[in-house]
Amino acid sequence: MDKVPYLLKRDVFSDEELRLIFDELQFLNNSYLMQPPKNSGSAISDGNIIKNNKGVFLRNVYCREDASSIIRLLKDRLSDYGIQYSKLHIANLTAADTNEIWFLVSYYENEDCYKPHEDATFATALFWFNKEPQKFTGGDLTFNNTNEVVEYKNNTCVIFPGWARHSVSPVYFDGEGDREGRYCVTVGMHIVPK
Ligand SMILES: [Fe+2]
């Protein structure tokens, strides 16, 4: 089987950009905003919810996109990475025509994971963050059709096709309650007729 045509970028943001992003992630990660899986866009398999984490769609938080450093900075990187991704493989070509995107912040700790599933997107971009020093293990991404593993690391971006089956391994965390586990900002990339 062919490999999944995914784009991997490490060391995506500067220290100052990471500080802005992490401040916002910790603000978002409170009990009022973060929603359980059934309210935060979980994939479903055989009628069962298959993720175990908390999440919030940023469109439900901000009425102005430019109020969010996360949206501003991720969009900036995606303007470049999206083009690189579209050139990786003929099946990715139309990613350059993405005209609708959404942002979902997820937080993993205490054996949180996401079982194998496909995304209802044209392509998905994941951005990973944690407070240094890292207080957990796990949280790696696996492409299940090809058994390719992308090791979790702070300040990483992965872009892959929505059809590629993928999963997140359980996070083992030793700092409960301090909001310093594994953060993922998922960007759903769509091509919508307009
Ligand atoms: Fe997914």
Image: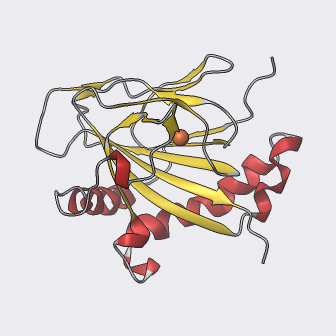
Residue 60 versus residue 93: which sits nearer the camera?
60
Q: Relative to residue 192, is residue 171 depicted above or below?
A: above
Quadrant of the image occupied by residue 9: top right
Task: Name the spot of residue 44 as percent of width and height, x first.
Answer: 50, 39
Look at the image and tell me in which quarter the C terminus lies: bottom right
Where residue 18 sits, quadrant-wise, is bottom left
- At a point 62% along the width and 16% down the height, the residue shown is 147
Give the residue furthest to the right: 90
The number of callouts visible is 0
Q: Quadrant of the N terminus?
A: top right
Left or right, residue 71 beside residue 101: left
- Residue 10 position, x and y percent, is 52, 39
The percent position of residue 3, horizontal first and vertical second, equals 75, 24
* Position of 150 relative to 101 (above/below): above
* Relative vertical location of residue 133 with respect to residue 25 in this rendering, above or below: above
Which residue is rendered at x = 18% and y = 46% of the image?
179
Q: Return the residue nearer the eye: 3 or 44.
A: 44
On the picture, is 128 further left or further right than 102? Answer: left
* Colouring: secondary structure
